[in-house]
Amino acid sequence: MARDTGREDHNRTDIMNNREIAAVFLRIADALEINEENIFRIRAYRVAAQNIVDLSGELEDIYNEDPSRLDKIPGIGKDLKGKIIEMIETGQLKYYNDLMKGFPSGFFDMFSLSGLGARKIGKLRDELGIRNIDGLEEACKKGSLAKIEGMGERTQAKLLEAIKHFRKREGRMLLSEAYSYADEIVAYLSRSGNFKKIEKAGSLRRGMETVGDIDILAVAGDGRKAMDYFVSYPGLESVIAKGLTKSSISLKGGPQVDLRVIEASCFGAALVYFTGSKQHNVKIRRIAKNMGYKVSEYGVFSVTAGGREKMIAGRREDEVYHKLGMRWIPPELREGRGEIEAATYAKGAAKGKKDLPEGLLKIEDIKGDLHIHTVASDGRATVDDIAAAARKKGYEYFAVTDHSKYVRIAGGLDEKRLLKQVEKIRKIARKIKGIKILSGVEVDILRDGELDIADYALKELDIVIAAVHSGFSLDKKKQTSRILKAMDNRYVNVLAHPSGRLITSRSSIQADFDGIFRRAVENNIYLEINTHGERMDLNDVQCRRAKELGGRFTVNTDAHETGQLDEMIYGVVTARRGWIEKKDVLNTYTFDKLIKALKR
């Protein structure tokens, strides 16, 4: 029986969800590590945080249903259970608040910089008095880090580059984070029963790799009630503005969310306008003007000689585009990069004009995931766990591709362990029904271009994914040379996360990507679109260029636990932004066609 907590849940604004509770535990672990506390205690907080993120239901719902069910969550003992309950009931944690008093504002921003962990940050604080990123930047420019053991000019240069990335991203979040916030808001609004239509807009709808504010458009039965309900969202920090047609809230530890309530008669026009991009909308307005029309968020209007306006389109997006002589343009393409010209001309009617892609990739086209790690290296799931999760997603197949021996920190496999894993996977594959399992490896490309697994082992695999995990700072010539050499290995099928970038902390490697894309075409190698929120690699621009050169792709999650299989959508969005079609993507193939395609 559900518990009567005596709380008016819908009126509270301090309810903490799983993501927020896990974030508190992770921050506590970071703080304890900086203060050199017991390693087992630190690990307990991190394990608990990961297990909370992996839960299928909200902790608050579990607690309200039956508090004893919290005991069944792996890694949650008496102490952590008490802390979870305190956060559920009060929206805060006294222990956390007290612990944070020992750290200055902005201190933990340093954790977002590549190459800085808790121990190094603790050293910077204790030896140089660095309290935030501003202080770190100043110390790097002065050369002060050279005074600290284990740091030098190279470390300083890397940190300055990471700080530059941080500055560029300030005020923005990864697409994956934005999706999470937006999905929760949309689900909340949908429960009110007052909204007839709800759509995400802005850079989120276009699938940009980073997002600022979250824009939501809606049609509501009662605008006033809609706004009252919106500003009562449980996860808000403050109400920025409230009106009859637009309100804005700030989420706890998250972004600003703007809700606009639109009349149904002009919803399509508003969706075009507020989806953007700016460049796309400028071109649309220019076309409308040339046709003697006026276009805005309120619709498409014909204008008489006397200046009178008559609305001629606006209820739906497609009618807005059609009235302006265009096919409907998918949101991901609306960046002012040729999509208007491609949509304006009938197929083949204008010489030299590119047409919009006919079969743009969709999430339902994906038949499997070809880059997954297990407990054999640094993953947190067994092959059986992944099989169950992949089958639930309706996949036909998946590939196990654990790290190779060079990545020691990830427990990478040598040839002996890899071949034993192949035998194990084949046994499991014979036992499990309803899904096919490929045995593979994510093999490291060494600095000289050799692979760190011998050919005699690679030839036993169903799929070989080659990747760079070191030597990111090699010059363009050396970097290109090593990758091309690796791609000439007859057993390589896929080049993983080709640019090596991490959106928030690491720049792309310097390489001749056109040369790499051409070699991929020559050698029948597929280019990965890695869906991890920090990677999105290849990015949209690189996808489009690779396709122009004849490249083919595979969209993979690089999952390290079963929940990450859900991140496939971010790679699909990136592929769509790169004009990639279903026919271009390896893991849209049936299993039999896949196996044939992997033969080199």
Image (spheres, rainbow, N blue to C red):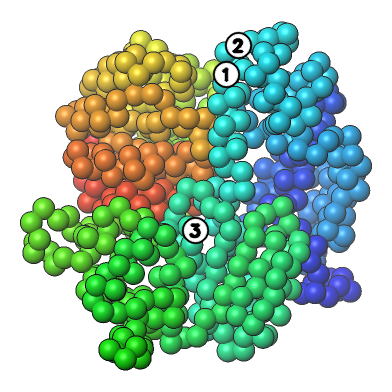
Amino acid type assigned to the residue bearing label 3 in the image: Leu
340 relative to 376 in the view: left or right: left
In the image, residue 175 lies at what x, y percent? Answer: 52, 51
In the image, residue 194 lies at what x, y percent? Answer: 61, 85
* Element carrying mark 1: helix
Q: In which quarter of the image is residue 105?
A: top right
Tell me what residue is drawn at x 88 percent, y 45 percent.
97
Q: Kindly check if marks 2 and 1 are in contact, taking CB atoms under 8 A apart as contact.
A: yes
Q: Name the residue under label 3.
A: 204
Amino acid type assigned to the residue bearing label 1 in the image: Ala
Tell me what residue is drawn at x 34 percent, y 24 percent.
511
Q: Mark 1 points at which residue?
A: 157
- Would you place residue 176 above or below residue 67 in this image? above
84 relative to 192 in the view: left or right: right
- Would you place residue 512 above or below residue 329 in this image? above
Residue 153: which disc? 2
* CA–CA distance in space, label 3 to label 2: 39 Å
In the image, residue 37 lies at what x, y percent? Answer: 85, 26
Residue 257: which disc? none
- Would you place residue 254 above or below residue 325 in this image? above
Q: Which of these two is toward me, 577 or 50?
A: 577
Q: Farthest front residue?
A: 306
* CA–CA distance in space, label 2 to label 1: 6 Å
